[in-house]
Image: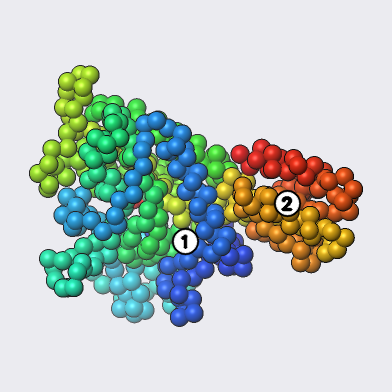
């Protein structure tokens, strides 16, 4: 795909996100804050649905995984133990000519800000030596800004799970193998945030750490690879746009012995969507060493004591959202015009149904309001009586709403409505008392 068509598709998605209330630039009235975004009325519903879908499949439907919500600020020693203070760095390079700052390992794919047709490695700018730049945001706890009060905004949610592993084990009476899941914010001072919400400095992760007996790690790793790619399929992401990528030695994070990414075919190329890592006993051993606490597991059945290995599945919530939007966006050529449609899976669509009176008279608005009031206790629905019904359909197509319910003159006679399905645009008549079942069946 050419650079223009990449920009074109991404620009269209960014513009739709703003127009329909999915995602806004943070602090926009002050000129915006680079790489930070706010979720609008539709965006927050989509995000809640993605998170709920993840939580259901990773926690609610399983007996061997429990949840946790750890604090963002944690003891600074945790980040020494985890290796992040020392090793969570990116190579940074400055350009003295354009004053740009770049990742030294991405010069070939980063356009020069002054000569966008050339990449930074070929634009002729004067580059500095490479420096190592730590990605953690540092701040201070309490009133005194001194080194002793330094704390970090967590760059991954995982560490909150490791340091609570014995608390959870004892309180939930789980036995190895078992997992702990968490959804929460993470922060990274990325050198080159880019592609809208793909790489930002503040983002949300959906992480699960699965504790297994050493020696069983390889089979669990395979199990979680399959489970996780299937989850994106169930989310409605097209299979042909998903693939695995195995990390070679140069790509492996400091904590991982084996790592696979699930990648998505974005308009800007195949990129990481989720990481699946065999973190071995690295993290728990380091926390044992730094905290002085015994984090070994005692297996009642075999009378063995061991440090569990950890298989991690680490998904980006914002990145999943972007994936869902990109995968769903389509400009469909119809006989007389083009319609923009977001073919989001009904499971995660922010609004499940639009409800319209065909005209604003003859008691139709009253009936449509009644349907709206009944349905809103069960799902997100939207009442709209403004403009021609065709335009109302198109507005909902663009918002990703899978169903539109119209009250017309026949409704007044036989209490049936038309339900139009977004993707096929087919309509069928359904009794007013059967609408809820009809929607439930198709959404779930
Ligand atoms: N605990 C392991 C870990 O954090 P990672 O591969 O660095 O692994 C996991 O991150 C996921 O978090 C990524 O696959 C991505 O979806 C998301 N992620 C990481 N950095 C991000 C950023 N700067 N902006 C948005 N999402 C990010």
Q: How many marks?
A: 2
**In the picture, which quadrant includes the N terminus?**
bottom right
Dot 1: what SS?
Answer: loop
**In the picture, which quadrant includes the C terminus?**
top right
Residue 206: image x %, image y %?
Answer: 40, 48
Is residue 229 in sight in this rendering? no
Residue 82: image x %, image y %?
Answer: 21, 49
* Residue drawn at the location 23% of the way across and 56% of the way down: 74
Q: Is mark 1 within 8 Å of ligand 1?
A: yes
- Circle 2 or circle 1, nearest the eye: 2
Residue on which disc 1 sits:
197
Along the line of sight, the residue nearer the viewer: 434 or 36: 434
Q: Is residue 28 above or below residue 316?
A: below
Residue 284 appears left or right of 212: left
Residue on which disc 2 sits:
371
Q: Is residue 139 above or below residue 50?
A: below
Residue 408 appears left or right of 140: right
| Badge 1 density bin: few <14, some 14–19, many ≥20, Cα 10 Å | many
* Residue drawn at the location 67% of the way across and 58% of the way down: 382
Residue 35: image x %, image y %?
Answer: 42, 67
């Amino acid at each position: 795909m050419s650079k223009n068509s990449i920009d074109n598709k991404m620009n269209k998605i960014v513009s739709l996100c703003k127009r329909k209330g999915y995602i806004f630039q943070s602090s926009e009235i002050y000129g915006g804050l680079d790489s930070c975004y706010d979720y609008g009325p539709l965006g927050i519903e989509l995000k809640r649905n993605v998170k709920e879908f993840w939580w259901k499949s990773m926690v609610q439907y399983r007996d061997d995984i429990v949840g946790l919500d750890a604090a963002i600020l944690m003891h600074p020693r945790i980040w020494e133990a985890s290796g992040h203070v020392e090793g969570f760095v990116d190579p940074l390079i400055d350009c003295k000519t354009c004053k740009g700052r770049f990742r030294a390992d991405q010069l070939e794919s980063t356009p020069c800000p002054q000569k966008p047709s050339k990449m930074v490695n070929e634009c002729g700018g004067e580059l500095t030596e490479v420096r190592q730049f730590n990605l953690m945001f540092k701040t201070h706890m309490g009133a005194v800004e001194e080194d002793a009060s330094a704390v970090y905004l967590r760059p991954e949610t995982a560490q909150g799970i490791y340091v609570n592993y014995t608390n959870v084990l004892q309180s939930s009476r789980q036995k190895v193998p078992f997992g702990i899941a968490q959804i929460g914010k993470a922060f990274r001072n990325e050198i080159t945030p880019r592609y809208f919400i793909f790489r930002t400095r503040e983002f949300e992760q959906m992480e699960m750490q699965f504790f297994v007996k050493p020696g069983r790690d390889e089979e669990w790793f395979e199990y979680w690879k399959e489970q996780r790619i299937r989850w994106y399929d169930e989310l409605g992401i097209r299979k042909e746009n998903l693939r695995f990528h195995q990390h070679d030695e140069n790509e492996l994070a400091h904590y991982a012995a084996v790592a696979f990414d699930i990648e998505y075919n974005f308009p800007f190329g195949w990129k990481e969507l989720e990481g699946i890592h065999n973190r071995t006993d690295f993290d728990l051993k380091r926390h044992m060493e730094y905290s002085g606490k015994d984090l070994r597991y005692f297996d009642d059945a075999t009378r063995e004591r061991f440090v569990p290995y950890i298989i991690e599945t680490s998904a980006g919530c914002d990145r999943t959202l972007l994936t869902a939007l990109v995968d769903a966006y389509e400009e469909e050529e119809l006989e007389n015009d083009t319609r923009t449609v977001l073919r989001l899976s009904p499971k995660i669509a922010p609004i499940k149904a639009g409800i319209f009176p065909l005209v604003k008279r003859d008691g139709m608005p009253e009936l449509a309001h009644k349907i709206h009031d009944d349905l809103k206790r069960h799902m997100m629905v939207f009442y709209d009586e403004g403009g021609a019904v065709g335009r109302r359909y198109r507005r909902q197509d663009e918002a990703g709403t899978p169903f539109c319910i119209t009250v017309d003159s026949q409704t007044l006679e036989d209490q049936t409505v038309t339900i139009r399905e977004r993707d096929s645009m087919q309509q069928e008549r359904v009794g007013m008392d059967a609408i809820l079942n009809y929607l439930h069946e198709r959404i779930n």
